[in-house]
Every structure is written in C-alpha cells, then in structure tokens.
Image (cartoon, coloured by chain):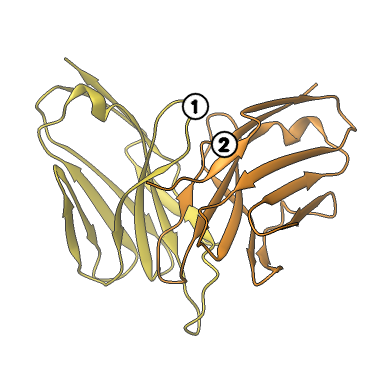
Chain colours: A yellow, B orange
Amino acid sequence: GQQLNQSPQSMFIQEGEDVSMNCTSSSIFNTWLWYKQDPGEGPVLLIALYKAGELTSNGRLTAQFGITRKDSFLNISASIPSDVGIYFCAGLFNAGGTSYGKLTFGQGTILTVHP
Amino acid sequence: EPEVTQTPSHQVTQMGQEVILRCVPISNHLYFYWYRQILGQKVEFLVSFYNNEISEKSEIFDDQFSVERPDGSNFTLKIRSTKLEDSAMYFCASKRQADQPQHFGDGTRLSIL
C-alpha cells in the first residue's frame, strides 16, 4: 500500500521560531492535506493542496504540494505556545477521476513550543 | 461551524463483546469514513461509505467489522466480537463532495479489557 514518510518525528523549539516539516512518498498523490491533532481530539484540517506546485497559506502556516506529487511541506512562522500538538500530513490518490477519499496519513510530527 | 460528533467519548468493553460506535456526520455531507488510531501511532483508514454502501475498505476491516447508516443522520461502526488489539481511538469523518477534504470528529476511545 501507499506509505508516507513524515519528518521530523518531533521538534522542540522556542516561541517565535519558524518550523518546517515535510512528507515524502514513493507514489504520487492527487491531494495533500495537513491536519493538527490536539490531545484527546480529532485531526483538524489546516491546509488542503490540490495541484502540483501549489503554495497555499493560512495565517502563519504555509504549505506546498511538490512538483513531483510525491512530497509536501508545511511551514509555521513565528511559532506560539498554542501551536503545540501533533501535525499530520495526509495524501489522497484519485484513480481514474473517481475518489471515495481514502486518506493515507504520515506518522506525525510532535511539536513542542517553549515560551 | 457544523461538526462531526461522536458518541461515546470513551467506551470500555470486555473482550468478545459487541460494541457499536456512533457518529453524526455533518448534515449535508455525502461521504463517510471510519479511521483508527492506536495509541502513539498514525491514523489508519478503515472504511469509506457512499450512496448507502461500502466503497472501499482496508485489510483491517475484516468480517468482525460492519458499518451502517440506519437513518439520515447517524453512521455507526460495529465490532462483533472485540479483541484486545481493537483498543484504539476511532475517528469518524465526512465530506460533502468528492473534491473536498474530510472533517473529523473528536473520536471514541475504545478500551478492550
């Protein structure tokens, strides 16, 4: 099956620093999604990317859909304590123009922000 | 903002017992999903449901699992005879259209004793 490799596994940063994490795959995806998960809660969508090369921002978050369709990165600028959580990338492969939406998730990046 | 809601938030069940996890997807959504997350691991796809039938399922979703949309609002996951390894967070997700991202509920923590 499709596998996503997400790195780094964890990050410890100071408030105000920028953060970068990425996902790579051996196979292509049509859609890349980035979710954040807080303890005891479900994944919350941060950014959705639909086209190769697409660069999208959501406040302090910026994500890009790699040109090869096999990778994506997420940047967080000027981190704040509430950015703490687990960040997951997820890929969707749409074969033949139809998709029921099975998402393949990365292993997650645990972000800790020290005030 | 509309949300996917799941009940109960925590379910404790004896091994071998049947369990039903309940979800109320966002009201105008048409595609429904169950995912599982074992403690400390990534989220794994179980099953997708569209047009009143299963559209795709993973190898995890064996004969012990079933899903149902008994009315216009609920979407349930049943595990017939639970095993210890079924202990996990179970997330329901839904979306309106094929090209839209999925929205997740807060999950049900299933603990098998």
Task: Tell me if mark 2 has few (under 14), some (14-19) or many (20+) residues whose alpha carbon lies within 10 angstroms of its own.
Answer: many
- Left or right: residue B112 compared with residue A81: right
Report in which chain the residue with disc 2 lies: B
Quarter residue A67 falls in: bottom left
Q: How far apart are marks 2 and 1 (CA)?
A: 8 Å
Q: Name the residue under label 2.
A: B107
Quadrant location of the C terminus of chain B in the rendered image: top right
The disc labelled 2 sits on which kind of residue? Gly
Q: Which residue is drawn at 18% across and 59% down?
A: A56
Query: Is label 2 in a helix, a strand or a loop?
Result: loop
Residue A94 badge:
none
- Of residue A28 and residue A26, the one placed in the foreground of this image is A28
Q: Name the residue under label 1.
A: A40
The disc labelled 1 sits on which kind of residue? Gly
**Are discs 2 and 1 both within one chain?**
no
- Left or right: residue A112 compared with residue B69: left
- Left or right: residue B25 compared with residue B102: right
Q: Residue at x 83, y 36 (%)?
A: B82
Q: Which residue lies furthest to the bottom in this view?
A: A96
Query: Is label 1 in a helix, a strand or a loop?
Result: loop
Q: Residue at x 62, y 33 (%)?
A: B108
Percent across and percent down for residue B81 are 88, 39
Percent across and percent down for residue B10 are 65, 26
Quarter residue B37 falls in: top right
